[in-house]
Amino acid sequence: MRISIFGMGYVGVVSGACLLRDGHEILGVDPVAAKAEDLAKGHAPIQEPLIADLLAEGHKAGRLKASTSASKGVKDSDMIWICVGTPSKTDGGINLSSVETVIRQIGEALRTCESRPLIVLRSTVLPGTTEKSVIPLLEAESGLTVGRDIHVVFHPEFLREGTAVDDFDNPPKIVVGESCPGAADVLMKVYEKYEAPSFRLALAEAEMVKYCDNLFHAMKITFANEVATLARSLGADSRRVADVYCADKKLNISARYLRPGFAFGGSCLPKDLRAILRVASVKSLKLPMLQGMLSSNEIQISELIERVLKYRPAAVGMVGLAFKPGTDDMRESPYVKVAKALIGEGIKLRICDPLVDPARLIGSNKEQVQMALRHLEQLLVRSVDELSAADLIIVNHPAVDADCVHNWLKAGIRVLDTANIKGVDAGAEGYEGIYW
Ligand SMILES: NC(=O)c1ccc[n+]([C@@H]2O[C@H](COP(=O)([O-])OP(=O)(O)OC[C@H]3O[C@@H](n4cnc5c(N)ncnc54)[C@H](O)[C@@H]3O)[C@@H](O)[C@H]2O)c1
């Protein structure tokens, strides 16, 4: 395939070198003349293992070209990969000026040539950028209609400097956001021989995935360092502690606790977090990420309450009161906090939690829930059918199915779903997922 790469920096050069090795014809486009000259001779403009050899071989085979001319990069290409930088502005915002310049140049060139290459944006851009900025700009400059005359996809890059060729060859995943179904067909041909899970998403989803990865990685590093700060201060070897928490692939290094939903609670997480924060305070340790977790969790709770109150319901139903499904443990349950707040607002509340039997509650579970909800017996109903008198139902546990939710919606009851009930029509009138 003839692939032009706009932006021969880190991502562009690594991608170009690996695509050359895979047999493609590469034209590198960069306004920095010295880079284009280096590349045209088969020399690597960056330091990265294996890159010099791959470029030299591609050059020898006559498949590597370079230019400072954007129009050259548009003419005679099947695909254009845009790999220009998207650095920070002084206010922290993203600087899209290079992306915009390239799009203008490509658009202008498309006006005067026959080729209709697939436009592949690889630069990291904020969710919504491709759809709301890149595509309108390209259409305005080229006079073409995206989706009819030409296609645009967003294709994030996951390579790490220092191991970039290996990361290109063994990607953790291949992700592409499409402006319309099938838009990425040409791009996916490049990856036919690559073994990696691939995901074809909406544009904004693919753009968000790239940020999620970087946020997640930054969070992991910060977590490890804050925990190590604690460990050192408390006389534990942080490296051995890390060996063990990393070895737990069931609960720790896994998808557990990583799905969007509602606040955490229960008898352990809030209590243990508070104890650690107290130690940190006494020892003057600075742990901003751990400190932020409790207040972030409280925000989840207050925002759900505000969301309910916004509808001014006279009667609310709740499915699930225990801190999670499968237990009757209500200690520090965030749903108890929601229930208490709604009662405090004068709302008539009814709760269905099949596992909560007031007669069987004992110990701190009984004490805590009685402190928060004095007349628990009067709030509880035995069957979800008894919630049908509510104006709004909050589904906290997956104790109801999609049919039940649809019946409530048909009856004009608003449903706020924090449990992600499977099979619910997310577009149905009156349905709100907490984050979807
Ligand atoms: N570096 C990484 O490890 C990495 C990994 C994944 C994603 N990304 C993302 O990929 C994008 C590129 O990152 P990078 O590190 O390769 O950037 P970089 O700064 O190394 O390279 C950008 C290149 O674009 C060129 N350029 C600027 N304007 C141009 C134009 N109008 N036409 C053609 N070329 C132009 C520059 O001269 C430069 O060579 C960024 O959005 C970055 O966030 C980077």
Image (cartoon, rainbow, N blue to C red):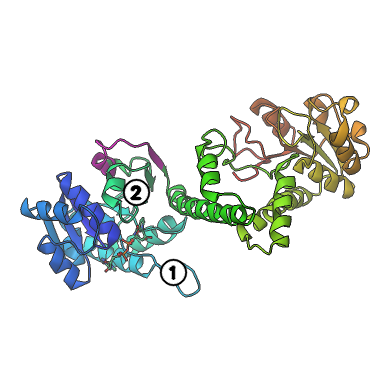
Q: Position of residue 41 (x, y in %)?
A: 9, 63
Q: Which residue is at 77% across, 34% downward?
A: 322
Label disc, if present, on residue 363 of the rendered structure = none
Amino acid type, mark 2:
Gly
Side of 204 relative to 106 (left or right): right
Q: Position of residue 18 (x, y in %)?
A: 21, 49
Label disc, if present, on residue 147 of the rendered structure = 2
Q: Which residues are magenta?
A: 186-200
The C terminus lies in quadrant: top right
Q: Position of residue 103 (x, y in %)?
A: 31, 63
Q: Is residue 193 magenta?
A: yes
Q: Which residue is at 51% across, 48% downward?
A: 239
Amino acid type, mark 1:
Ser
Which of discs 2 and 1 lies nearer the camera? The answer is 1
Of the four image quadrants, the one with ligand 1 is bottom left
Q: Is residue 28 above or below residue 197?
A: below
Query: Which of the two labelled residues, at mark 2 and mark 1, occupies the earlier sequence position?
Result: 1
